[in-house]
Each structure stands twice: as C-alpha cells, then as structure tokens.
Image (cartoon, coloured by chain):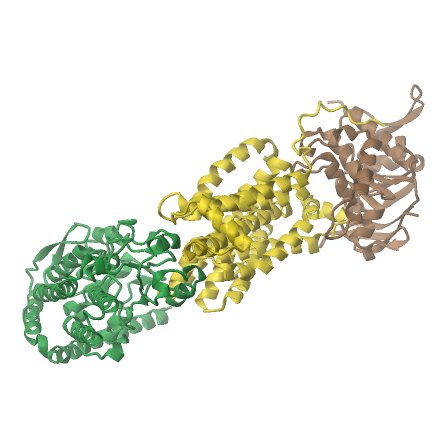
Chain colours: A yellow, B brown, C green
Amino acid sequence: MRLAEQSLPAGSPRAGRTPISAWIAGLTAALILIVLVCLCLGQYSMSVGETLHIMTAKAAGAEPDWKPMKENIIFFLRLPRIISAGLVGASLALSGSVYQGIFRNPLVSPDLLGVSSGACVGAALSILLNWDPVTTQFMAFGCGLLAVGLTLTIPRLLGSTSNIMLVLSGVIVSGLMGSFLGMIKYVADPKSQLQAITFWQMGSFASVRYPDILSVLLPMVIGFVVLLALSWWIDVLSMGETEAKLLGANFKPIRNAAVICASLLTASSVCMCGTISWVGLVIPHFARMLVGSHGTRYMPVSCLLGACFMIIVDTTARNISGMEVPISILTSLIGAPFYIALMRRRRGELQ
Amino acid sequence: MIYDVRKLQFAYPGGKNIINDASFTLDEGEILTILGPNGAGKSTLFNCLANIRRPGSGQILLDGKPMEKMSVKEVAKVIGYVQQTHVAVFDYTVIYFVMMGRAANVGMFSKPKEEDRRIAMDALKTLGIDHLAERPYTAISGGERQMALIARALTQQPRAILLDEPTSHLDFGRSTLILELVRELKSRGYSVIMTTHDPNHAMLLGGKAALLDRQGILHVGPAEEVVTEENLRPLYRSELHIVDIPQLGRKACLSAGLKAI
Amino acid sequence: MKKTIALILALCMLLSFASCGAKTETAKTQEPAKTEAPADTKEDAKTETPAEPAKTEAAEPEKTTVTVVDSTGREVEVPKNPQRIVAGWGVKNYICMNINDLIVNEITDKFCLSLDPDLANGGSIKRDGNTTAEAIAELDPDVVVLKWNSKLIPQLEALGIPVLGLSIEDEAEMKHAIEMFGLAFGREDRAKEILDYYDTLTAKAEELTKDIPESEKKTAIFLGQYVGSTAPDTTLQGLAIEQAGGINPAADFGRGELWAQGGMEKVMEWDPEYIFMANHLTSRDYTLESTIEDPANQDLTAVKNGHVYESPCEIDLWMYPTLSIKLGVLWMIHTMYPERLSDAELESIVLEFYKTIYGMDVTREQLGF
C-alpha cells in the first residue's frame, strides 16, 4: 500500500554509502601518518631523515649511532606529548558527541556544559588541599559531574528545557565555577599551589610525561569502550526520554552511564592538561558532516578526528614560532570560524 | 486479550478526577477509537494506556500481565506507539530512524543486526516508503514523517499499535489514507487504539468506540451503538446530526450549521 | 540594629587603638636594631637625623610636595616626608628605607614580617579578597605604591591620592626604584647608601669574574616559571648569569618576555653546563627534583654532571627581582667557580648584606643556605 506521496527525487544522501570501516581504516592511517610527521617536528634541530633513522633503528633494536639526547627528545618529549594530545582530542570529541546526543542539543560541548570548568575546580581544590594525583582525578571527575548536574537542573527549575536555555545554563554554571576557581586561587599559597593551578589551567602538553598518561589511561579506556559500545543507544536516547522509553530503552541507566563516562573522559583530559575549548564542539559536527549523524558511524570517526586535530594543533603550538603558543588560542582560532561555517551549512537543520 | 482495563482512575494533583472508573477490553485485531471533547482527558487516558502515565488507581492488564509490573522492554514488545509529532534534532536517515523500533530487542552494549535492518526495511515496504530509506529524516515531508513513525512502531513487532490523533496534522486526503492504513493494520491482526477529534473516523473504522465525557466517565461499546446523536450532542455541546448518505451508503456526522447572525 | 552599630564602632575603636600601640612598639624595636649595626651606625644616623625633623615639618601647615618620576615615567606629586604609606606591592624593595613605622597597611610578605612582625597589624587594603581603591583610600595614605600595571592607579589618581607605579625587571629599573623611593619617602640619604652598597656588590661580582677567559666561561641557563621556560637577558635572572661570569645561551631568546616559553627541546639544543632554578618559581609538579628525575632530561650535560641548582635561602628569595638578586649573582659565581668565591667568603658577604640593607643580625642557619 503506497500511502505516502512520492517524495522529490532523492538528493545525494548525506550519510554517504562509504562503509564506516573504510572511514575508520583511512583515518587510522592518517592518524599514524600524522603521529610520524609530528614526531619529526620540534625545536631541537634534527632532520626528518635522522628522526626516522633513529625511530626505525630503535624499532629494529639496532645499536645507537646517534646522540642519546636525540633519542630522549623523540621518545620522552615528543612521543608522550603526541600520545596525550591524541588521547585528549579523542576524549573531548567523543564526550562532546555524547553530550550532544543525550541532551538532544547540537550546541553543547564539555566546556559549554560547565563540565570542564567544574573539573577544573575539583582539581584546583585538590591541589589546594595537597591531595595526591589520584584523588585529584577523582575530585575533577566529581566536580565535573556536579557541574553538569547543576547545568541540567537550572533549566528545569526555570521550567524551560529549550536548547538555548541549556546553553545559557551552561554559561551560568561555567561562570560560577570560574568564580569558585578564582576563590581557590585567592586562598592558595602563592608559592607552590597557585603556580601549579595556574600552570595546569592554561592547558598545555609541555610537561606531560608517561606517568601522567598512565594515571589517566584506565578511566579513559573505560570511557571510550563504554561510550562506543553505547553509540547506538545514545542515538535512541536522542529521541527524548518519553519516546526512548516507549521504544523499549532503559532511559535512565543508559543516560547515567553515558553522562558519567563522558564526564570521566572530560575530567581525565582536564587532569592531564587543563581546559581546552572548542574541540568538543567542532569535531563532532565535522564528523557528522563527513559520515552522517548515525552515532555508530560518527562517534568512532569523531574520536579519530579529534585525536588527529589535537595532535596537529599541539605540534603547531610548539613549532609555529620559537615560543610555545597556548593551545586554547589555536583551538579557538581554528574552532570559531570553522564552527560558523558549519552552522551556515547546517542552518536549515538547527533552527 | 491485549488490553484488559479495570476501574482506571486518574487525577492531577489537587484536581478532580478526569478519568473515573474506566473499564474496557480490547482483543487482538480489534480497533478502539477514543473520542472526547478538548480537555476531557483523552490524552491522559491514552498516555495511561501507552505506559507514559501511571493511573491513580485501577489496573491495566497488558496481554494478561499488570502493566505497572512490566519493564519498558516488555511493554515495547506489545505496544507500538505513534505520537502526534516528532521533533527531529539530528538528520538520521529514515531507515536508521525506523530501526530504533528494535530497541527492545537490542542488548545494552549492542547495536541492531542485519536481521533488525531487514525487519525495519519490511516495515518501510509495508507502508510503501522504502524509497525513502536513505533520505535524511529531516528532509522528508510531514506526511512521510508520519509514515516513518508508523513504520517505526511496526518495527517493534508489537501486537497493538497506539496512534495519538494521527490525522491532526494531515490534509483531508491524507487523513483518509491513514484511516485506510489503520483498517489494513487491523486486518493484519494488530489491535489499534486511536484518538481522534472526528466522530466520522469512528464510524468509518467500525470496531469499538469510547467516549470520554467531561466527568471522566468512559462509554465503551461497538462504534455504531456508541457514536449516536444522543451521546455526541452533550459530549460536544453541539447540535450535530448523524445522517444517512445514500450516495455513499454510509452514515456521517454533521453539524447542524452555523447560527444565524 | 543600634546595638550592632555600637558594637562595630567599639570594635573599630579597639582596632585603631591596637594599631596605634603597634606603631609605637615598632618605633621602639626599630631603634636598638639600628644601634646594634656597628658597621653602619654613621650612615644610619645620617638617615635618621633628617627623618626626625621631617616628621615635625609635615605637621606644619605649609605642606610642600616633591615631584617623583615612577617606573612608568609618570610624574607624581608626593607630599614631602609622607607619614602614611600604603605598600601595595613589592614592599621588599623599600622596606629597607627605614619606613616600617610609616606603613599603614597590613603586610603579608613573610620576609618583611620576619624583619618586623608588627607590619602584620596594619589596615587591610582588600575587600572580599581583592585590593580596592576604596579600601586603600580608607587608610588615608599620603602615598601609595602599586605594581606598574595595576588597574587601581587611575582610580586612586581620580581620588587625588598619589600613586607610584613600580616595576623592577632589570637593573636600571631597580636603581631607579631605589632613587624614586628615597625621594618620595624623604629618605634620599638612605637610598644613596643602599645604591652605593648595591654598586659595591656589582663591582665585587665584576672583580671576581672579569679575568675568566672566554673559553673557560661556563654556559648556564635559568629555568623560569614553567617547564621549558627560560630567562632572556632582559630579565634580572637571565642577566644574573652573565653578571656571574657565565654565558647564557638563552640570552637573546624571547627578549622582552618575562619567561621565554621555548620548551625543553630548546633547552636540550643549548645543553648548558649549569641549570639554575629559583625556589619561588617551582611548584608542586615542577620542582628541582622533577627536573633532575625527568627521563627526558637524563642526557642534559647539567643533569649528568649534577649541576642543576635551586636558589638557596629559606627566608628570602635570591632569584627574585629585589636587591637580594645580587646575592643570587654571587651564589651563582660560587656555584660555577667555587675557586673564585669560597663558601666562607659568600657567607660573610651574605651576612653583611642583611645587616647593611635590612639591619638584620642573622646567622647562616636562620637564612637557610
């Protein structure tokens, strides 16, 4: 029974027919290439050929015929930096994708929901109280969750759940967290604590070493695995609570698991390098533009794109001039215009 | 028996009962059309039946089991719900959207399989919209979206389909198509519950009809017995007539006309 | 309501009494310190004598002013011999002007408090954690000292309160600041004395290092506030290396920046023989130990040879832009060229410094170096 009217001839479907495995394989190859190229770039004068020689010789287990310092630079300075940038980029992009789906709002991201600034407050508080790094991570995570909870509560208290309201609420909570952070910095001991807080808040990968990566690896892996496994369910949840339940989805457990894991990813990133804005907003949109809106397709792509993007940005930050450029300057410089372009392309769908 | 509703009662906090002692049963392959004036609690009753609201007292047995004790998954395997409107946030393709009807059959950390996709595709074919499968849901017309919503409900492979005023956003021609579709669903063995503003729909569909009046009393019975002038006039507070239309060989509900100015 | 107001008033009165008491005590404790400094009794006497009549002068109606040029080049009219000074920033640089009893605000700097614990009893210039113009104005100061880029400077100017903007990032600014304070606080003689002593130390450093052949000069860099940040020769810390007879390979890198953020790779490219750090610039996650232990740094010459140092001295900062930076220079000389400046010689200069500049009788243990 043909009841629906014949619709207009189909335009090129946005989702595209390229199988997702092809995208993932392609992007993984691109990621590996980017990592290799970025390992060759740095302030220390070392030719690309020499870097590649050291890496291949090292991999083959050959006797070193180079200055040991060069090896240190590649494996102890550049590599951990690249790994952490990749992890942070992937984390922020994935958590942004998840928040956008769960809250049915393409305008949100970890930084806009106040999760990042909440995590910042938690970590700063922990530094203030001289707690150990593991506790710092827990505090960052707890305060990040608290902040996102607050962001979600404000629109409900005001009886409006529109997209804009949620964004405004995020702005309010970020502001509030900003003032908490100010207070913490005010009471912090200027000698050691204040500097630790300020330095880490700036968002830099300059001092990341392997132990820092190891300390966030487990929560990050948990976050990635759970969220990628839930990618289809996050789309079901994007139908809204009532509808998702009628379809047979256990809304609350899935939503809670997803929000907790996304906040875990954000908090882990914040612990490693402070807040980095824009990545969690722009990359998911870019991924959707490439492979369509289906969570099962764009979430893994979003991870890989985020990793590539962050590594490129960080490598640019440490090479663009003699000095290190703060990452957030670059991410906003690239992110803001890019986002405007995306909004323009998608304006019909956002309203 | 799909639905066995017993002495259903519902009141909003601090308000009077808007559903009083509603009882009825619905068998497999039966149609129930719910009629009532605006504000009488039609949607509330419908939402109770769909498991969106919990009744104040009374019981709904769904396929013999008390609905309040069933999980959302169990309910979703019996009832497919088609809401009036759906606001799309993301541009999922129609097939992906329809596949979400498989949620009750997909594991927690899993995604739909090839089999699920086939079921969704079958639903699209049944409704004749399989050519839309790869189109973004945001780029199809309102009528096509209504179809996609029904296809999604069918993909749940339920035994009853609930339609909340399915014709309210459709033009005259397409409303008739929807009614034909409802009858088709019935003939395929689905039970159908539908709310509507138009008594003609109940008469066209036959089956059972339920009138919910302003006191929250539900009158249920065969459509031809319930949809009568004497029942409808107080319900809609309107001078309406049910007349035979010989050309069509059916009865129709018409208003008496406008008052003279 | 009335009760509360009465209570607040009573409290205010009590507090003002307390601070008055504190002031007189300060003056008392100050004197023996002066007389106990035998090497400088003459000099001290000089400064004290003009200071005394100045106080009575100020009480007279014809209040004259003196024009002072501050670190930013602003001309500021300051009342001659001010009696009420608000030390809003960098108090370490002018506490040596014998102005303890003129400072009316609360001082929190630990070193200054170790000199004179009563400085903690002044009025607060903060409201809800932020320094505000109104809080400063309430203390009715004759002159205020703030950081050169403070937003409060125009506000206080609008209130008609003279403000000196202070910046001490290089040698010239340091000297200018001492002169400025001498003039503004009516302590020109003391300022001259301090400058002379400062020049003596500069000359001493020059004397010790002048005949080091270029080929024997050690290379050294100063690590700044962040991992991989260095000090160019436009900073006092970067300059200190050269004054200590070292070669600072980072001298022209990022000139004009406070800390040139080049990253550890830059440091490895320079690979200096010595690495200096400052005990006030390290933080929880960035310390002397973390720098030495970082696996990435293991092949740095300075790390391999154990030549990574942090400025000593527990109660004062030697690698911070105050007069004490000269001690930092001498400490660097002792560290890089111990044969040119022995530990004992360094110790005697350090003790003399604290006596001359701050009138302190301290032991090496108290200083903690």
Q: Is residue A322 left or right of residue B195?
A: left
Residue C121 placement (x, y as % from top left): 26, 72
Residue C33 placement (x, y as % from top left): 15, 78
Q: C262 or B44, which is in the foreground?
A: C262
Q: Is residue A190 visible?
A: no
Q: Is residue A167 left or right of residue A323?
A: right
User: Which residue occupies 28% across, 52% down?
Assistant: C151
Question: Looking at the image, is C115 positioned above or below residue A185?
Answer: below
User: Which residue occupies 50% across, 48% down?
Assistant: A171
Q: A177 or A169, which is in the foreground?
A: A177
Residue A270 placement (x, y as % from top left): 50, 55
Q: C206 or C158, which is in the foreground?
A: C206
Q: Is residue C68 visible?
A: yes
Q: C37 or C342, which is in the foreground?
A: C342
Q: Residue furthest top?
A: B247
Q: Quadrant of the C terminus of chain A?
A: top right
Report which quarter residue B231 is drawn in.
top right
Q: Quadrant of the N terminus of chain A?
A: top right
Residue C312 placement (x, y as % from top left): 29, 71
User: Which residue occupies 60% across, 53% down?
Assistant: A262
**How many numbered marks does the figure carry?**
0
Question: Looking at the image, is B251 positioned above or below residue A284?
Answer: above
Report which quarter residue C216 is drawn in.
bottom left
